[in-house]
Image (spheres, rainbow, N blue to C red):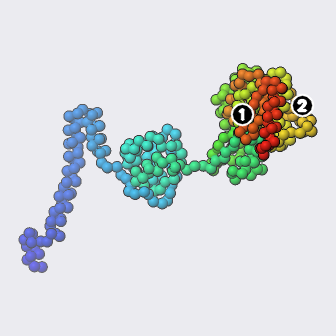
Amino acid sequence: MTETEHGDPASIGVGGLRASGHRARARRGRGCLPVLLIVLVVGVIAALGYVKGVDFVKNILSSSPAADYTGDGQKPAVVVAVHDGDTATDIGNTLVKAGVVKSVKAFTEEAGKDERSLSIQVGRYQMLSKMSARSALLVLVDPGSLIKNPTVTIPEGLRASEVLASIAKQTDFSLKQLQAAYDDTASLGLPAYADGDPEGYLFPSTYDVKKSTTAASLLHDMVAKFSEQATSLDLEREAKALGYGPGDIVTIASLIQAESGTADMAKVSSVVYNRLDIGMALQFDSTLHYALNLRGDVVTTDEQRQSSSPYNSYLQTGLPPTPIDAPGTEALQAALAPAKTDYLYFVTVNLATGETKFASTLEEHNRNVAQYREFCTTSDEC
């Protein structure tokens, strides 16, 4: 070995002593750091008092940047749920557990910078793994990112058989499954005044069809929606005030729904009550159509009007045995709040516009009917 190798240390290359010396200084620094922190903490606490001092130290220690991923994320995709009442911290915890964001702090800091985070909607979102907190927040504040369940929409005025057929067309449920669920009336949650008959109680609305939804649970939801509306309208108490049972009101609402078209429902309601009050037959084609399973603007014949069906309101007085369709909220409201009139008749005189005329006397009604017939001579609507 040469003298240079054992000689003056200054002649040794930078790859030797200088690098070694740097590591040594680093080790000495790490060894002193805990002592310095302890001195700092004790000093702060002594100066500010225990509570303020501890808070101050916590703020110092928490001021380091939050752990965060970069970029818009990567596969695999994950589905996360935001629940009613969730705070930004709750959502952050959900995202961390799902592997979407790296830390709760990173997410809550981003949420605090964007006021849209205050209106994040409840629901499920499809996200990627390892997203930056900002990217994750941008997904959540976009309502279009919500995973939407398939829906089924039932319009007002459908008979129960038509409701089942409509659901079958809009979902994967078979008509057989739906009919079996419908026939199991004890499981539908019907109100007592329905007398075990679901006709009129499958409330028209739009319903989510989730993975867990069954034919039975969907029909149960529809009856529950009716009950919700009935409670909102205070149906039982209001029916009693009118001198009718709640089931009668649902039947009256179904008649209003079937007969009104675009006419004023409150006025149509008044005709129903005025006829009932004087024992006059309702004489509605809609009830006879129900008995004969007819649809459309079919005018009943004299022969059909001789039917012995209890739904033949030409021969029978009073209300039909059950509702004849599923009334909506407006029809139920009209049944509970009829207009104050002396009308006994109404007829739609223009099927194109829906113009309907009401009358208190048969003579006046006949003039309105003549106007309807005149319209039919020049229109294909009839």
**Label 1 to label 2, Cα distance in Å?**
25 Å
Disc assigned to residue 13: none
Nearer to the camera, 376 or 99: 376
Residue 375 as seen in the image, left or right of residue 60: right
Task: Answer with the quarter of the image where residue 351 lies.
Answer: top right
Q: Position of residue 303 (x, y in %)?
A: 92, 39
Q: Position of residue 218 (x, y in %)?
A: 68, 44
Q: Secondary structure at mark 2?
A: loop
For badge 2, the amino acid type reads: Leu
Residue at figure coordinates x 83%, y 26% from the top left: 363
Q: Is residue 126 among the parts visible in the rendering?
A: yes
Q: Is residue 319 among the parts visible in the rendering?
A: no
Eyeballing the image, is 369 above or below 162?
above
For badge 1, the amino acid type reads: Ala
Residue at figure coordinates x 17%, y 58% from the top left: 25
Eyeballing the image, is 157 above or below 167?
above
Disc assigned to residue 263: 1
Eyeballing the image, is 59 above or below 282?
below
Residue at figure coordinates x 69%, y 42% from the top left: 155
**Viewport quadrant of the N terminus:** bottom left
Q: Secondary structure at mark 1?
A: loop
Eyeballing the image, is 14 above or below 35?
below
Residue at figure coordinates x 83%, y 30% from the top left: 366
Residue 109 as seen in the image, left or right of residue 193: left
Q: Position of residue 166 (x, y in %)?
A: 72, 47
Nearer to the camera, 108 or 46: 108
Label 2: few (<14), some or many (≥20) within 10 Å? some
